Amino acid sequence: MHYPESTQLNLLRRTSSKFTVTVIVDRCKECGICIAVCPTKVLSISNMINKHGYRPPEPLNIDKCIGCKLCEYNCPDFAIFVEKVEQP
Ligand code: SF4
Ligand code: SF4
């Protein structure tokens, strides 16, 4: 199925047993704030380039995420979100 470009969200998402971190790739401006504020060094710059020419962060060390949401609260572009994984 084809969706118009405006409804497509290019997501970079990693999930641990506790938390999911999602990056809305094309909102990122590569400011690096999320990487700097993460207390457990979950995030690092990815190799991908978004449509504006910036490299978004990737939650490579997702197993170290403590769900503090500092990345989400500090991103000036609302490009990164953290959710708690619901336990069955
Ligand atoms: S929620 Fe906290 S620990 Fe998890 S990626 Fe964001 S800043 Fe790092
Ligand atoms: S804080 Fe937001 S805009 Fe800045 S690098 Fe992280 S995701 Fe991208």
Image: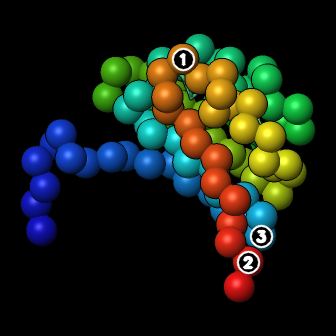
Q: Position of residue 46 (x, y in %)?
A: 59, 36
> Does residue 39 appear left or right of residue 3 in this picture?
right
Residue 20 shows which numbered tag?
none
The quarter of the picture where the N terminus appears is bottom left
Q: How packed is label 2: few (under 14 Cα within 10 Å), some, or many (20 or more)? A: few
Circle nearer the N terminus (2, 1): 1
Quarter of image, res 76: top right
Circle nearer the N terminus (1, 3): 3
Mark nearest the camera among 2 and 1 is 2
Q: Does the residue labelled 1 lie within 8 Å of ligand 2?
A: yes
Question: Residue shown at 71%/85% (left/top)?
Answer: 88
Question: Residue shown at 68%/72% (left/top)?
Answer: 86
User: How far apart in space, not on screen, are marks 2 and 3 (Cα)?
Assistant: 9 Å
User: How far apart in space, not on screen, are marks 1 and 3 (Cα)?
Assistant: 28 Å
Q: Do the residues labelled 1 and 3 touch (CB within 8 Å)?
A: no
Element at label 2: loop
Question: Residue shown at 45%/40% (left/top)?
Answer: 24
Q: Is mark 3 within 8 Å of ligand 1?
A: no
Residue 76 shows which numbered tag?
1
Residue 17 shows which numbered tag?
3
* Type of amino acid at the residue the image marks with label 2: Gln
Q: Where is residue 25 in the image (x, y as percent from the top left)?
A: 44, 37
Count of residue discs? 3
Q: How packed is label 1: few (under 14 Cα within 10 Å), some, or many (20 or more)? A: some
* Type of amino acid at the residue the image marks with label 1: Pro
Circle nearer the N terminus (2, 3): 3
- Colour setting: rainbow
Q: In which quarter of the image is ligand 1?
A: top right
9 to 16, vertically: above or below: above
Question: Residue shown at 34%/21% (left/top)?
Answer: 52
